[in-house]
Image: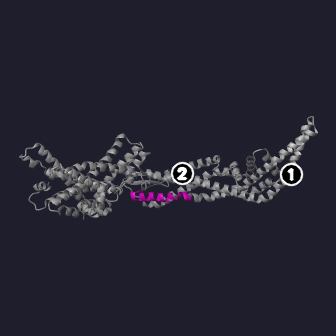
Amino acid sequence: MLQWLKALSWGRYGWLLRRHVHLVLTLGVLLFWSLTGLAVAEILFLPVWVMATQLIVAGSLEAARLRRRAWLGQYLYERSPWHRWLRGGVVMVVRHQLLGVGLALVLLVELRLLPLVCWPVLLLGAVAMVVSRDLLRRRLSRHVIARHVDAVTRRLLMLPTAGLLMIALVMTVLWLPQPYLVGLRWEEALLEHLQGRENDSLLGFFVRVGSTAEITQVWVMQNAMQSLRVANSAALLGWVLLLLTQSAFAWAYVRLLVGADVLCREGRHNGGNVDRSGIRGSSS
Amino acid sequence: MSLCHVSSSMTAGRGLPCVWRHWALSLLMILGLMLVLGTGLRLLEQRTDDPLYRVIVNGQPLTLDAENHAALSRDIQAMTGDIEARLMARMTPWLEERLDQAFAPLTLAVPDYLDWYYSPGGSYMRLGVALVGDADAWLDEQLHQRLVRPSGIEAALAELQVDYPQRLAREQQGLATELTSTLHERYVSRQVAAEGESEQPVHEFDLDGVLQHALQDGLDTARWSTAAAGGSGAGLLAGRTLARRLGASAAVQGSRMALRSLVVRLGTGTARALATGGATAAATAPTGPGALVAGTLTTAVTLASIAGSEYALLKMQAAIHRPTMQTQLLEAIGEAREASLFFSLETAVSAAAVSQAEQLETQAARRGEGEPAPNAYRILGRLNE
């Protein structure tokens, strides 16, 4: 691995960058949107949401089709017309779109609330995903049908990458200093630390909801650590909330990156420039 | 595999490229969601009002809206920030004056003490005690008896210890009253005319009560520290503690060293004299109880002559050392005075003021006032402990 890194010349770095320009662009858009001021973020909210949704849906649709095709191939006759009916239609698309809209929303709101310290973890996750994808594909190409290598790679990649990222994020959240809420009532904690109170727009509302979840979780965990006024079920709720939000965030993030990969490959197959211009168009 | 064939079956017949159909679908969904949620949010906002806050300042309730309430808590924080410095500024002149009063007689008593110290009687007593036993303890005792007690400083300092917490309480009360009246003046015009007040949730915060509570706690701290001062010797220096402190100064130590060297020389002389005295007595009066008396008398005479020769030396020392000893004693008294001043200010006042400010802040934080507390909480750090 180290040898391989050393062997890379500058030209090869450039080539790598050009090969992953879609990922860099996606991450750049997300980073810009999460760090920019509230006014700009509000204006860009709709396009960024659409873009994130689209990327997430592309990844999850591909995985769902792959699964469905394997299932159909397992049980149906070759000549059956059910192949055409069941391979995934409007219902599947709408279901994944709805799921994608929700996941993208979680991702974006979490990004607004995320401290800057977490970004290295996210970027490291992206790099780890790219490296393990290349390694995995090289390994799989000898065994998997060439047409499906990319899709299978991405499908196998999702769970471990998202899981590792989730663990890293949970550790970061636990390690980072939190506002001190020990001994406060829940309403007082909210009253003091709620973010996004100053704007009435929809984004502000989402940020408030996300912030409420975060404060609740932090409040429950701190007071459970100090064993103050918190029942066991409430402490459990805190941990569940932490794991749920972080895993949803990590899942959405990795889905987004994988989806960017899917769209990029497809754009190349369909003649090159369609999807990348799409990403650029949505980010501007 | 392609994404297109599904959506093309869905929106067949239109001229859009297939990838864009997915984008359009996402856009539509998100727009719909935003519309629904936005409308819901507007409805929710119309139904809820801003919460009102009621703050009891200077004995009168003020009803404030959220904005003024935040301004009020900022003001409270700003005003309590330098409360320690203000309290010190108020206490210092008074304490200075009282300490001056207490220490003046002590300074005046120094020449008398030195008169005794270098008088023939005093010198002989010193010599005698140095010969017999522990000169240090005896000298401390003399300092206490002849310098500290006549000056009446013990009584003065004890009185000061009693007066101090009372004065502190008065000054704190004055500061608190000033604070509340300023706040009241500033905010009484910014009240909200609340209609239908009874049905609205009003957050109440009793500033007066918190202040009283903080004052009480601060006062307790002051009492504890002055009570501890008498025993530990770190407090208002009274009585024997003061004597010990005065005795530790350089001049006094120097004279003690001289005394000790004298005793060493005397010791050899005395031993010789006793031996000869005893020998003479044994030779002249071989029998009877008179022998012992004669021997002792001879010894006493010899001792007196030796001591007389040493006395001239002592006198010379006195002429040289008396001015230095006087200035150094006065300096030591000044130091003791400073020490008691700083001790009482540093510990008692600041403890009281700090506890007052802290109390206010924590109370304010507990009531949901003010900025986020500066403290942070680390779960992982806590687990490692």
> Residue B128, image x and y in percent?
81, 47
Which quadrant holds residue A22? Answer: bottom left
Q: Is residue B71 magenta?
A: yes
Q: Residue furthest top?
A: B288
- What type is the residue that disc 1 sits on? Gly
Q: Nearer the viewer, residue B22 or B324?
A: B324
Evaluate whether label 1 is on the same chain as label 2: yes
> Residue A178, image x and y in percent?
39, 51
Q: Nearer the viewer, residue A135 or A54?
A: A135
Q: Chain of mark 2?
A: B
Q: Nearer the viewer, residue A116 or A135?
A: A135
> Residue B139, image x and y in percent?
75, 49
Label 1 and label 2: CA atoms lie apart by: 66 Å
For disc 2, the marked residue is: B215
Q: Residues within 10 Å of mark 2 (few under 14, many from 20)?
A: many
The magenta stretch spans which residues? Answer: B64-86
Classify residue A177 as left or right of residue B93. Answer: left
> Residue A175, image x and y in percent?
38, 50
Q: Could you tell me if residue B206 is visible in this image?
A: no
- Which of discs 1 and 2 lies nearer the camera? The answer is 1
Q: How is the image coloured?
A: one colour
For disc 1, the marked residue is: B308
- What type is the residue that disc 2 sits on? Leu
